[in-house]
Amino acid sequence: MNGNAALAALRRDFHTSVAAIETYRQCSKKFELHYLRKVPPEHRPVQLAFGSAVHAGLSIFYESLKNSRLKPSLDELQAGFVESWKDQLDSGQPILMGESDTPESLERLGLDMIRVFHESAPVPYRVLGSEEAFSVELDDVVSGRVFEERLVGSFDGVAEDEPGNHVVIEIKTASRRWSMQRLQDDLQLSAYSWVAPLVGLKNVSICLLILIKSTPPKLEIFHPRRDKKDHQMFLNVAAGVLRGIRAGAFYQALDWRCKTCPYHQSCRSL
């Protein structure tokens, strides 16, 4: 079972995810429409569609290193991206693009980003997995009881930088450079740092690779640190969100994101 299939199987059980938690924090009404009411989205944000296609290409990088310990060719990665980008465009769901975006311009950008990654991404000592799915219990920090929902997700990559030292690899695409504050506040990194030992990884560090959609594209590499305080912050946030969901606390955020939200019309018609 490949990583995507394993993740899909875990999602069939009652669960939450970092993406769901972040969605609730940004707009609880959007969470309700997407995760609870299952309202079909009006479109797919281009950032999500494009990022998925880039990830599909880059997953080949780690799959090859895992299976053969050989770095794949640039052509292989770019072909994986092009195939996935075509699938995104042909999915039947409209993609909301920026004013200057076209399918062709984004394909060229994606090919350039894949090339930069192929040239600059570090090759780990040993790759253990690509798109590695996980499922762990979440505790309610107030009552001490275990939530019904399990936290489900997947690591972009799992590797060793030397025998016995595990690395969780996370890849992101971004329109601009991340600030140090954003790096420190990122909830997903705190969550993944907390999860890693629970699924058997030891002496864990995080390698964050951010592909910047600049001209030309750039790859920035970070090794953010997380400690028990960061883990506790994630658990506090997750528990607060799950308690809010149970209480039926859903309201419209009404901010700058509304205009491009995939549920904009559905939300306005309530």
Image: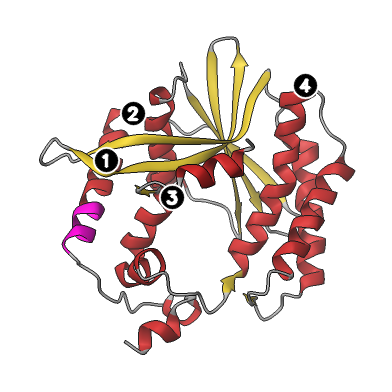
| Residue 187 sits above or below residue 163 on the image | below
Going 71% across and 25% down the picture, which residue do you hit? 66
Residue 223, placed above or below residue 90: above
* Label 1 Cα neighbours within 10 Å, binned few <14 / some 14-19 / many ≥20: many
Tell me where residue 242 appears, x and y as whole percent: 24, 53
Q: Distance between the residues labelled 3 and 2?
A: 16 Å
Q: Which x, y percent locates residue 5?
A: 59, 43
Q: Mark 4 points at which residue?
A: 69
The type of residue carrying mark 1 is Leu
Give the secondary structure at mark 4. Answer: loop
Along the line of sight, the residue nearer the viewer: 78 or 32: 32
Q: Is mark 1 on a helix, strand or loop?
A: helix
Q: Which residue lies under the disc numbered 3?
A: 182
Question: Magenta stretch?
Answer: 241-247
Q: At 71% from the left edge and 78% from the top edge, which residue is drawn?
A: 100
Amino acid type assigned to the residue bearing label 4 in the image: Arg
**Of marks 4 and 2, the one in the foreground:** 4
Q: Where is residue 16 in the image (x, y as percent from the top left)?
A: 36, 49
Front disc: 1 or 3: 1
Q: Which amino acid, by three-letter code, is at mark 3?
A: Arg
Residue positioned 85% across, 50% down in the render: 79
Which circle's residue, 4 or 1, is located before the other in the chain? Answer: 4
Q: In this view, does 228 lie to the left or right of 11?
A: left
In which quadrant is the C terminus drawn?
bottom left
Question: Who comes first in sequence, dot 3 or dot 2?
Answer: 3
Cα gap from disc 4 to disc 2, whole angstroms: 32 Å
Are the residues at dot 1 and dot 3 in contact (C-beta closer than 8 Å)?
Answer: no
List the residue tagged with mark 1: 235
